[in-house]
Image (spheres, rainbow, N blue to C red):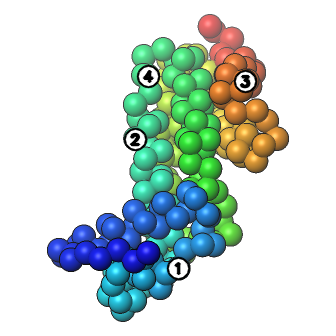
Amino acid sequence: MARTASYHHGDLRQEASLLALETLREQGDTAISLRALAKQLGVSAPALYRHFSDRESLLAELAVSGFEELRERLLAVDQQVPRRALIDIGLVYVAFAQDEPKLYRLMFGGRVLPKEAHPHLDNAGHGAFHVLQDTIDRAQQAGYLKPMPLALMTAAAWSLVHGLAQLTIDGHLPAANAEPMLAEGVLSLLLDGSRSDLT
């Protein structure tokens, strides 16, 4: 059913984004079209096209909002104890994927939003990635992790948590509510092999 509403300047963009996110969560990205959203919002398609040049630009905005939320969650991790911070960063990452599986796939899949096609999306992704990188850097500076190249350590950590998240939301591994210690155990395996001999 179409929504009837009078929009103030800027409200339509936000309303469309919220409705698109709701559609994404329930049906996936293939169910999203600007014309369908316009009809649901009770506005003309041209009115919506003034805010989003095409479907892909709208999906990019959803992915940006996802990366921003992920970054905020990662930034909330307590950094005082290196081992705990590293494990918690991984747990937060996996939990985000479990909370928002369809959004997570849109953010990282590359099928709909190719890399470098949307610079603001790439920047948002880097913002979340740098929180992980900074956490590893602090752990190295504290002498907890081996003094290996930061890029290598970050790639290993990211590969682990991303793979764990993907396997979980695809149903190949149990979710945290079914097996709460699995993710922490897997993350600990990486840390045990990366600890500095000085600790």
* Farthest residue, direction bottom: 46
On screen, residue 189 above or below 50: above
Residue 27, percent from left and from top: 61, 63
Viewer-nearest of labels 2 and 4? 2
Q: Is residue 36 left or right of residue 177?
A: left
**Viewer-proximal residue, 117 or 8?**
8
- Which mark sits nearer the N-terminus, 1 or 2? 1
Locate the C terminus by quadrant.
top right
Q: Amino acid at mark 4?
A: Gln
- Which mark sits nearer the N-terminus, 1 or 3? 1
**Viewer-proximal residue, 7 or 199?**
7
On screen, residue 141 above or below 45: above
Q: CA distance from mark 1 to mark 3?
A: 37 Å
Q: CA distance from mark 4 to mark 1?
A: 41 Å
The residue wearing badge 4 is 79
Residue located at (54% from left, 17% from top): 84
The residue wearing badge 3 is 179
Q: Amino acid at mark 3?
A: Glu
Residue located at (61% from left, 56% from top): 102
Can residue 48 be seen by looking at this rendering? yes
- Which mark sits nearer the N-terminus, 2 or 4? 2
Q: Secondary structure at mark 3?
A: loop
Residue 134, percent from left and from top: 48, 35
Q: Which mark is residue 72?
A: 2
Pointer 1 local density, CA inside 10 Å: few below 14, some 14–19, many at least 20: some
The residue wearing badge 1 is 33
Q: Amino acid at mark 2?
A: Glu
**Viewer-proximal residue, 173 or 20?**
20
Viewer-nearest of labels 1 and 2? 1
Residue located at (35% from left, 74% from top): 3
